Amino acid sequence: MPSTVAAGYGPDSSTILAVRLDGWHRQFQICKTKAPGAGKGEAMVRRTQQIVEEQVLRWQMERRDRKVQKPPKRAPPHVIVISNAYGSNANPIGEAIGNITGFKVYDREIVYHIATHAKVRLETVETLDQRAQSWIDDFLTGLFREKGFYQDQYAQELTRTIVSLWHHGPCVMIGHGCCHVVPRSHSLAVRTTASESRRAMRIQNLEKLTTLEQARKRLERTDAEREAFIRKFFTVHIDDPLAYDMILNTDRFDTRQAAQAIVDVFMKRFPEEVKPAPENGWSREGPEPSQWRL
């Protein structure tokens, strides 16, 4: 069954958070808050923390099982990593990919929460076996030396979080430079984009803005912030086509079509990782992906 942690916004701008672990689904819908870029409600932060804590508990149980079973040494898994232009529908697409493949889905809020909370970040690493932890230390040392990544404390904590989530198993990760951290030999790197007019309309609709001009201004500000972040921390341009395996214009695809296109390419590259769920890969549990935030 899919094991998914995600945070999103409903069509009425209320915060929706959901977790699907070991076949059960729990959804929370809480007080209205502003969307990303306009401030977060305390309720969302608390719920995100709860979701992450539940996922850490699952990892701890899995580690105990591994100790009993003594599994053989295995290579790092293959994952899907997504860089998204604001308003390009990446989070609903990521959730849909999780429904098709059964992969865990880590959106921007989940990755950020783990990276910025020392206790959770430590638990994320320590629930891996010692062999994996040693490999991660060596990998990160080489990564910063060879790629010249920015090396302040947050950059190191963020990259360790991304690499640790990668090692926990096949997953979908969205945002925060994950496309530039996980090697292409072990990932399908996807950039979602769309026309400015379509992105602005999505932002206006989902964030309940009064005018399209407000949406355009928010889009321009968020695009600039993300470009500056990627350029500073990973020394690449966010729109460089050579930084990705696949660039998807979501003007041309709905959520399910886009998700299936990504999964099809992933299956061609890494066929051993994909085990489709029942019902042709679509779970009937949980909220419709198209109702989730940008």
Image (cartoon, rainbow, N blue to C red):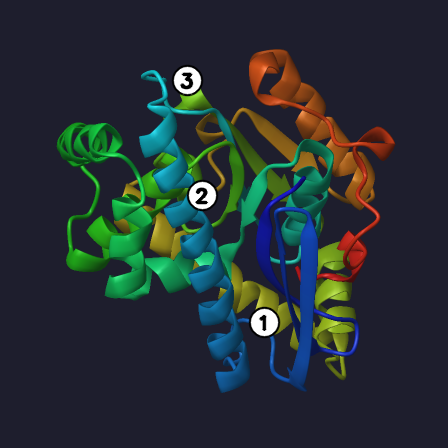
Q: Is residue 108 left or right of residue 281?
A: left
Q: Which mark is residue 218?
A: 1
- The residue singled out by tag 3 in the image is 185
Which quarter of the image is occupied by the C terminus? bottom right
Name which of mark 2 and mark 1 comes first in the sequence.
1
| Amino acid, disc 3 | Ser
In three-dimensional space, the C-alpha distance between marks 2 and 1, rounded to whole angstroms, equals 18 Å
Give the number of marks: 3
Residue drawn at (36%, 56%), measured in percent from left and top? Answer: 228
- Secondary element under disc 1, as helix, strand or loop, is helix
Q: Position of residue 154 (x, y in %)?
A: 23, 58
Residue drawn at (75%, 36%), measured in percent from left and top? Answer: 258
Q: Position of residue 104 (x, y in %)?
A: 56, 43
Q: Position of residue 29 (x, y in %)?
A: 70, 76
In the rendered view, tell whether residue 264 sits above or below residue 22: above
Which quarter of the image is occupied by the N terminus? top right
- Within 10 Å of disc 3 (Cα), the crowding (few <14, some 14-19, many 20+) is few
Eye-nearest disc, 3 or 1: 3
- The residue singled out by tag 2 in the image is 238
In three-dimensional space, the C-alpha distance between marks 3 and 1, rounded to whole angstroms, equals 35 Å
